[in-house]
Amino acid sequence: MHQEKQEAQDGRILLYEDYNIRASSQPNVYGEKFVLRLLKKNTDIRNIFELGFPVEEKELKKSITKKNSITIIAAPTGEGKTTTLYSIIDYLNSPEINITTIEDPVEIRISGLNQIEIDSKSSFSGALRTVLRQDPDIILVGEIRDKETGEIAIQAGQTGHYVLSTIHTIDAVEVITRLRKMGLSDYDIASTLATSISERLVRKLCPECRRERPFNKEEKEIITSIGKRYGVEFDLSGTTYDAVGCKNCNNTGYFDRTGIFEILDLNDELKEMVMSGKSSLEIRQEALKHGYRPLVVDGINKIIAGKTTLEELNKKLLIY
């Protein structure tokens, strides 16, 4: 990073054996604001189900093993999209499959993968064009940022490849709207997008100090109203937990994080609606009839399972 520059910059600190540190600077009226992201080197890829994925393995295979298609993971920055991508790639990885990744930057190196790092002289779209001539079976594109990258990713999906990527948007249904806003046609989206996944990260209750209690009246009302909205019946006869705080969790009441997910598999009816230019609201209403459940449903299931709290879920999703 340039010390004398008075503009936003991105950089890295590579002094430590165990960690890479991503640095982002932003000038403001008091000088500069810095954010540092700690990335552990040579870390083991976590199993997709350890991340909190809410479906059985049979359903997961159905969602992420489709040729001639794209799977897109959607979430705001810092909500675990890259970790989920790596877990899916690790799940699919085998010696007979040619997997190529295009990333900015390569955060975790995985044996057996062809990993390409974007720099100032290259772009996702340019690298993707070259990769298509390298006979890949699966292509991971770090992020679809613009129309050109989206069009080439669609083209890759339409010509026999399986493409995995991420996009910045709020939920799985809004992936369709985001691709439309980039200028991709309804036909291309409908013919190629197979699955969109949205996620958030919530803190897990510390197992050493969490305190068990029954659900109170207010919690029951909030959860029951959400259940009615999405056609889900939650079992609130059990107990929930409060965050307390101890030495193990540095007196926060929480230790580690888990993902909450929603998965939208585009069946023929939904593809037809996309092709017809239907709004995201209409697509969402139809998807609910076919098993789609929004993030809040998985979040409440994890509250009932004793993994997190209603307060923590509300911080992420503003449910009350």
Image (tube, helix red, strand yellow):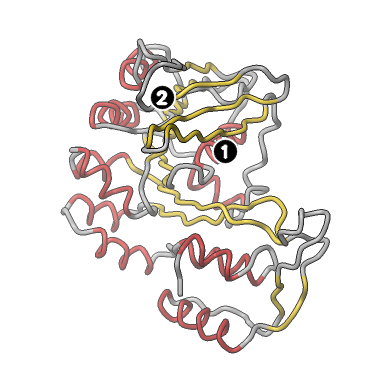
Residue 310 is marked as: none
Q: Amino acid at mark 2?
A: Gln
- For the residue pair 221 and 293, the one nearer the viewer reads as 221
Instruction: Give the mark nearer the N terminus: 2 vs 1.
Output: 2
Mark 1 neighbour class, 10 Å CA radius: few under 14, some 14 to 19, many 20 or more? some
Q: Amino acid at mark 1?
A: Thr
- For the residue pair 53 and 160, the one nearer the viewer reads as 53
- The alpha-carbon separation of the residues under discs 2 and 1 comes to 24 Å
- Name of the residue lying farthest toward the front: 30
Percent x, y for residue 78?
A: 50, 42
Res 280 → quadrant: bottom left
The residue under label 1 is: 83
Is residue 274 shown left or right of residue 208?
left
Percent x, y for residue 27?
A: 38, 32
Q: Residue drawn 77% across and 73% down?
A: 211
Percent x, y for residue 45?
A: 66, 34
- Name of the residue lying farthest toward the bottom: 217
Instruction: Report whether residue 206 is seen.
Output: yes
Percent x, y for residue 278?
A: 19, 58
The residue under label 2 is: 9
Instruction: Report whether residue 163 is seen.
Output: no
Mark 2 neighbour class, 10 Å CA radius: few under 14, some 14 to 19, many 20 or more? some
Q: Residue drawn 25% across and 29% down?
A: 151
Is residue 319 shown left or right of residue 304?
left
